[in-house]
Amino acid sequence: MCPGRRIRIAATFFALAAVGEAIAQSENPAARGATTTLRVAAQNRLPPAVSERAVTAASPFSEPCGDRAGTVSIGAEVEPHVAINPLNPNHLVGAWQQDRYSNGGARGQGYGASFDGGLTWTRGALPVTTCTGGEYARATDPWVTFAPDGTVHQITLAFTGESSAPGSVNAMMASRSLDGGITWSVPITIARDTDTLFNDKETITADPLDARFVYAVWDRLLGGNISATIFSRSTDAGVTWEPSRALYTPPQGGGTIGNLIRVLPNGTLVNVFMQLSGPPAIYVMRSTDRGVTWSAPNRVIAAGALGAVDPETGDFIRDGSIIPEMAVGPDGTLHLVWQDARFTQVRDAIAYSRSTDAGLTWSAPVRVNAEPGVVAFTPQVHVRADGMIGVTYYDLRSNTADPATLLTDYWLARSVDGVSWAETRVSAPFDISTAPFAGGWFVGDYTGLVSAGTTFIAFYAKTTGIASNATDVFAARIEQATGALDAKAYRAAPMPQEDLGTRFWDAVSANAARALERRYLKVQR
């Protein structure tokens, strides 16, 4: 049994009733070294419109490899991201953590390229860690992006040693590929710090209007739980990078996390992030000159996540509860999703809001996951070229009362207006309690979602039931434009407007503090 398997949380906020019928029997490989076998009920099988393929397999690293602090899950790929070539809808490039550690990061950053829409993949690993001839012990938080000329850019956080410990070092490293993600340039160090500062949760965005411009943004831990939003950019298609600089530091302490830049059709940059000063809240800031100057942050909304847990055992699931996700539609509308418990006040749902004025004002939030009686977590959002909105997420509706398993599903919800939605199962139930344990069962703080024509392509991690290869990354194509024959139709539920009081917001703040502790205060990040 993994450490923390019986961590408990206040029942007032987190006790959930068991739902769903028994659809599987399994052993827990993490606890017993066995192989999980799921017998999937007919109603939980994938509809004909969904085709799911494994992207990853066994670890590519030779033994011995990596440091020996903590427990490493060899063969476990987690926290994937994906991008699609704007010049070729069959061309995908993804990245992921390769061989996750229990106490932060992974033995390397894996990547893969597909030229047939995700059916087959060519895989490799960036040379940033010692397992691939690099300098650093571990890598984490991969992100990829395509420029409008087909150049692919990738970013990673590489580090050695405990965050803020004497002798530790960490760096933001970017690389580019000119052959579609098969080979990559030697990674460039955008920012490097030692024990006094720690960089975290980076993203990279190629400007879709001009291939010369590439933007990187992340948070930098300054001490305690105080962190600033840090920005760098390339003006020569990723050959060189400007010195990094701070865009924003919360005035009352606390920090930012989950920074992500999107580019509007008029060239305006919009950076979204979670601010963790007091109760968490989502903010955006804008730049109209390709990142030279930025507006002051604009508060969007408070974020009321309580975090995902096993309803039978109280075990934590590492989720995206402090990571907002945002996409821009073809008309310039911004679409924002995040975890929030205000719909029921006891369990997280997936909240959605939109802005038609570059983030100055936002629509009233609604719940977009179909089943309010179970926790939903780690959303991702993307908008197709025809304006169809897609939101993916995990939930526990297939879970049973058996404490030995924690059955988890992956879903895609679609909408043309943000009000009426249709939901399609993307993956059959899997036992997330056989995932690597890293302060909670961990398949990633985020996932990926893109589209080709009327097809959404989801990119996510799930468990395999094989103890020696606990998790893999999968790509699923959801083919139908409307899903009328294979999807559950429903209307989004509005968020209650009443004041929930200090008890609720204290629990929200406690969840945010736990999430930060898992990121910063372990033996390794």
Image: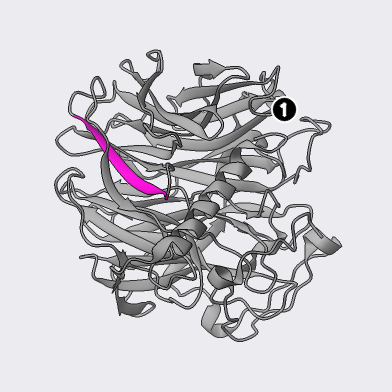
Main SS class of the magenta portion in the image: strand
Q: Is residue 294 magenta?
A: no
145, 417: nearer the viewer: 417
Q: What residue is at 49 percent from the left and 32 percent from the top?
A: 226
Q: Position of residue 70 (x, y in %)?
A: 78, 39
Q: Quadrant of the C terminus?
A: top right
Q: Is residue 324 left or right of residue 417?
A: right
Display colour scheme: one colour
Is any atom of residue 428 visible in this view?
Answer: no
Quarter of the image where one finds residue 294: top left
Is any atom of residue 21 visible in this view?
Answer: yes
Q: Position of residue 410 (x, y in %)?
A: 50, 65
Q: How many marks can you see?
A: 1
Q: Quadrant of the N terminus?
A: bottom right
Q: Is residue 283 magenta?
A: yes
Tell me the SS state at disc 1: helix
The stretch in magenta equals 279-287
Q: What residue is at 22 percent from the left and 65 percent from the top?
A: 416
42, 286: nearer the viewer: 286
Q: Is residue 87 left or right of residue 342?
A: left
- Residue picked out by circle 1: 131
Q: Position of residue 30 (x, y in %)?
A: 79, 59
Bin the neighbour count of mark 1 within 10 Å (Cα to Cα): few under 14, some 14-19, many 20 and up.
many
Question: Please, what is the three-letter code of the amino acid marked with disc 1?
Answer: Cys
Q: Position of residue 57 (x, y in %)?
A: 67, 49
